[in-house]
Image (cartoon, helix red, strand yellow):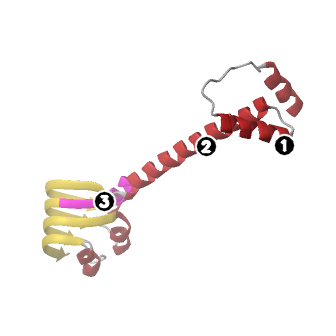
Amino acid sequence: MAEKETKEEETKKITISVKGIRDDLYKNVTDLAKHTGKTIGEITNDAYRTFIGSIEGIRNISQNFVEGAKSALPRYIDNFKKLEVTAEDLKDFGQKVAFRNIDELTFKNVTDEDIQKYVAFIDGVKILRIPKTVKKSTIIRISTFVDEIVQD
């Protein structure tokens, strides 16, 4: 199989003149070719492959970084008069959620673990209703500007 690939590569070789190559870089490539027993064309092909592979690797890393950063940011749920949220609702978002500017926010059928896992913070809520399965201390740690916490 390797022989077949080498033959196919050999048939696709063409002569190319490249302008603007610095003398010192060309000398380094020539020296490298002499020391390795490769041709300047083989060294150049290797360099192009490495460069293109590096660019693709950087592009993948960058894309993964952006996607990771997006998933780390909370999804904002805001500006509701009255909102009821269940554990299933929280799970459906697929990321942490931040609640803000809600007159009455009610968590129903949620546990302390659900809050810790899915709620980034709560801000600007007039009345916050939580079930007895959620500790007030868990809510207080992630809350700002909550007028009243009611545990039902």
Question: Closer to the N terminus: mark 3 or mark 2?
Answer: 2
Query: Which one is in front in this view, the residue at disc 1 or the one at disc 3?
Result: 1
Q: Is residue 152 left or right of residue 24?
A: left
Magenta span has 36?
Answer: no
- Give the labeled residue for mark 2: 54
Q: Is residue 149 visible?
A: yes
- Give the labeled residue for mark 3: 97
In this rendered view, identify the residue nearer to me: 28 or 135: 28
In this rendered view, identify the residue nearer to me: 20 or 8: 20
Q: CA distance from mark 1 to mark 3?
A: 60 Å
Indicate the quadrant where residue 73 lies: bottom left
Q: CA distance from mark 3 to mark 2?
A: 36 Å
- Give the labeled residue for mark 1: 35
Q: Residue furthest right?
A: 3
In this rendered view, identify the residue nearer to me: 67 or 104: 67
Region in magenta:
89-100
